[in-house]
């Protein structure tokens, strides 16, 4: 499906996450069940080409991951996603990469520009 991603690193110092030294996440039974449901939603989003549903799944997954590998200024990033009409926020579950997701459309360029300005204001410089 056509999708636009504005990716950026989330570590403040730009060094990333030492994934080999980071212990694997230990998900609760509730989180594991939530991921099972989200996988079904993700399959549906891909099958029907629904970027909005894909964005909701990515954001829900990112919220769960926040307990295991916290992203700095996460609430602010969610606010940027809402303010810029992004379909969602995705994060790496084992690193420091995140991205805002959009369906292509006539207002996409202005959404991307606004998101880059807001992310820069939060200290996320490289997009």
Image (cartoon, helix red, strand yellow):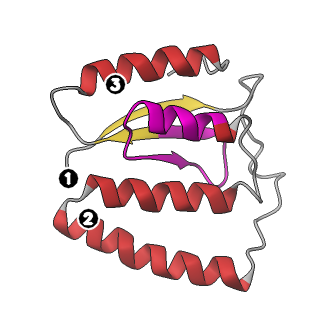
Q: Position of residue 21 (x, y in %)?
A: 84, 51
Element at label 1: loop
**CA separation, marks 2 and 1?**
7 Å
Residue at the disc numbered 1:
1
Q: Residue at x 25, y 27 (%)?
A: 108
Q: Confirm whether the magenta stretch covers residue 79.
A: yes
Earlier sequence position, callout 2 versus callout 3: 2
Q: Is residue 120 above or below residue 21?
A: above
Name the image quarter holding residue 100.
top left
Q: Confirm whether the magenta stretch covers residue 113.
A: no
Verify CB contact (< 8 Å) between mark 1 and mark 3: no
Q: Is residue 102 left or right of residue 92?
A: left
Q: Residue at x 54, y 29 (%)?
A: 8
Q: Residue 22: which disc?
A: none
Q: Is residue 35 left or right of residue 68?
A: left
Q: Which residues are magenta?
A: 76-99
């Amino acid at each position: 499906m056509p999708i636009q991603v504005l990716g950026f690193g989330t570590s403040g110092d730009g060094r990333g996450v030492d994934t080999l030294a980071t212990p694997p996440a230990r998900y609760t039974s509730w989180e594991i069940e939530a991921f099972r449901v989200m996988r079904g939603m993700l399959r549906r989003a891909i099958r029907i080409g629904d970027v909005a549903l894909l964005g909701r799944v990515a954001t829900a997954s990112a919220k769960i991951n926040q307990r295991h590998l916290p992203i700095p200024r996460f609430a602010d990033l969610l606010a940027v996603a809402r303010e810029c009409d992004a379909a969602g926020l995705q994060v790496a579950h084992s690193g420091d990469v995140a991205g805002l997701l959009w369906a292509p459309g006539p207002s996409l360029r202005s959404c991307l520009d606004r998101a880059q300005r807001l992310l820069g204001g939060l200290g996320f410089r490289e997009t």
